[in-house]
Image (cartoon, grey):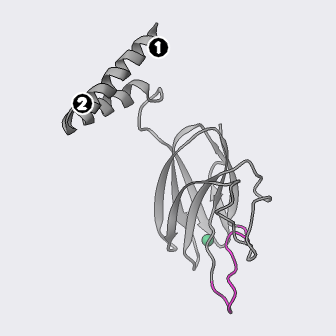
Amino acid sequence: MRLTLLGILLGGLLLAAACGGDDEKTTATATTQTTIGPSGSPGAAQQINVTVKEFSVNPEKTSAKAGKITFNVENKGPSQAHEFLVFKTDLGVDELPTQSDGSLDEEDPALEMIDEITEFNPGQKKSLTVDLEAGKYILACNRGEETGGQVPSHFAQGMRTAFTVE
Ligand SMILES: [Cu+2]
């Protein structure tokens, strides 16, 4: 009964959004999110501090509850810029697909790219908020640093760690 009513309500909102002008559309969208959003305080993300450095990715916790998660990532260097990638995959942290230089093959279908913080310098802090469903994830840096014509991958040198969402 309640589901049916909800369906009618949502249908009405969608209809209103489709027929209305921009103002009405905005209102309808906000109402819908309030109705069907996750329980608990909306918008409150779990905060997880992470440090990245040469060469590791170190979250203060290796698991979180499904929903919004904010990774507060600090680059502790000491000397190199790092990035922060969030991938969803069923593969273990040591069985991930790599390219010939040892870097993570980000295009592999076994990986689902969620989001990233692009390269940032030692001493800097950046935050990334993602909405994660239950599953297995990888937190990684996949930067290469040119050295004598080679590009040793940060990923290959250990900048990867498993993260579980329950
Ligand atoms: Cu790195």
Which residue is denoted by mark 2 in the rendering?
A: 19
| x then y, percent, for residue 6 | 41, 16
Question: Nearer the observer, disc 1 or disc 2?
Answer: 2
Q: Which residue is mark 1?
A: 3
Q: Is residue 150 above or below residue 117?
A: below
Secondary structure that dominates the magenta span: loop
Q: Residue at x 45, y 10 (%)?
A: 2
Q: At x 56% / y 62%, what residue is drawn?
A: 84
x%, y% of residue 97? 75, 62
Mark number for residue 93? none
Q: Position of residue 40 (x, y in %)?
A: 46, 28
Which amino acid type corresponds to the residue marked 1 in the rendered image?
A: Leu
> Relative to 131, does residue 95 appear above or below in the rendering?
below
Depth check: give the residue in front, 83 or 17. 17
Judged from this view, the residue extending furthest toward the bottom is: 148
Q: Is label 2 in a helix, a strand or a loop? A: helix
Image: magenta residue range = 146-158
Residue 159 in the magenta stretch? The answer is: no
In the displayed structure image, the side of residue 37 where residue 14 appears, left or right:
left
In the image as oriented, which residue stretches furthest toward the front? 19
Q: Amino acid at mark 2?
A: Cys
Q: Which badge, 1 or 2, is on the more N-terminal residue?
A: 1
**Could you say which is closer to the camera, residue 162 or residue 4?**
4
The residue sitting at 47% across, 57% down in the picture is: 127
| Helix, strand or loop at mark 1 | helix
Would residue 92 be found to the left or right of residue 121 on screen? right
* Local crowd size for mark 1, using a 10 Å CA cut-off: few (<14), some (14–19), many (≥20): few
Q: Is residue 27 visible?
A: no
